[in-house]
Image: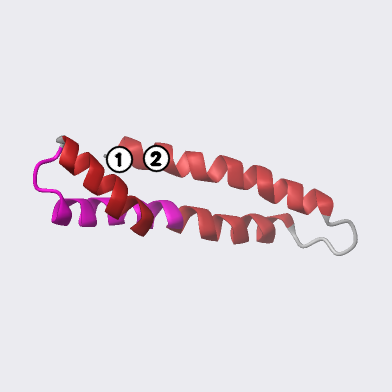
Amino acid sequence: MLSALIISLLAAIIPTAVYAALFYWADRYEREPMWLVMLAFWWGAIPAVVVSVWGEMFLGTRFIQAPGSVAATLTEGALLVPAV
């Protein structure tokens, strides 16, 4: 579980850093400090991963009684994915 969280965080942080750098580069007249731009993007990326992992664990155990079954997969895809 911890390795999945680390992989998810890296998958969120790396593209976020790229987008932050692009926005920083595109702003030619009033550039904000780079640390502030990165902080603003990471403030959205890191909590999104943590909340989605928590929501998947919390809601998944509540709704799905037989993990691994076709019904569980369909229920997760139809109910949990849009909520998280």
Structural crowding at the residue carrying mark 1, measured as other residues with C-alpha within 10 Å and reported as few (<14), some (14–19) or many (≥20): few
Span shown in magenta: 48-67
Residue name at image x 30 percent, y 50 percent: 78
x, y percent for residue 48: 44, 56
Query: Of the residues shown, which amino acid type is indicated by label 1?
Result: Leu
Quadrant of residue 35 within the rendered picture = bottom right
Query: Of the residues shown, which amino acid type is indicated by label 2?
Result: Ile
Image position of 45 (left or right of 75): right
Image position of 42 (left or right of 29): left
Taking depth in this image into account, of 34 and 16 the one nearest to the observer is 16
Taking depth in this image into account, of 4 and 59 the one nearest to the observer is 59
Q: Are marks 1 and 2 in contact (CB under 8 Å)?
A: yes
From the viewer's perspective, is residue 64 above or below residue 39?
A: above
x, y percent for residue 79: 28, 54
The residue wearing badge 2 is: 6
Image position of 81 (left or right of 23): left
The residue wearing badge 1 is: 2
Quadrant of residue 14 within the rendered picture = top right
Residue name at image x 25 percent, y 47 percent: 76
Residue name at image x 61 percent, y 61 percent: 40
Q: Which color scheme is applied?
A: secondary structure
From the viewer's perspective, is residue 58 above or below residue 8?
A: below
Image position of 41 (left or right of 5): right
C-alpha gap between disc 1 and disc 2 = 6 Å
Residue name at image x 30 percent, y 45 percent: 77
Local SS, label 1: helix
Q: Is residue 10 visible?
A: yes
Local SS, label 2: helix
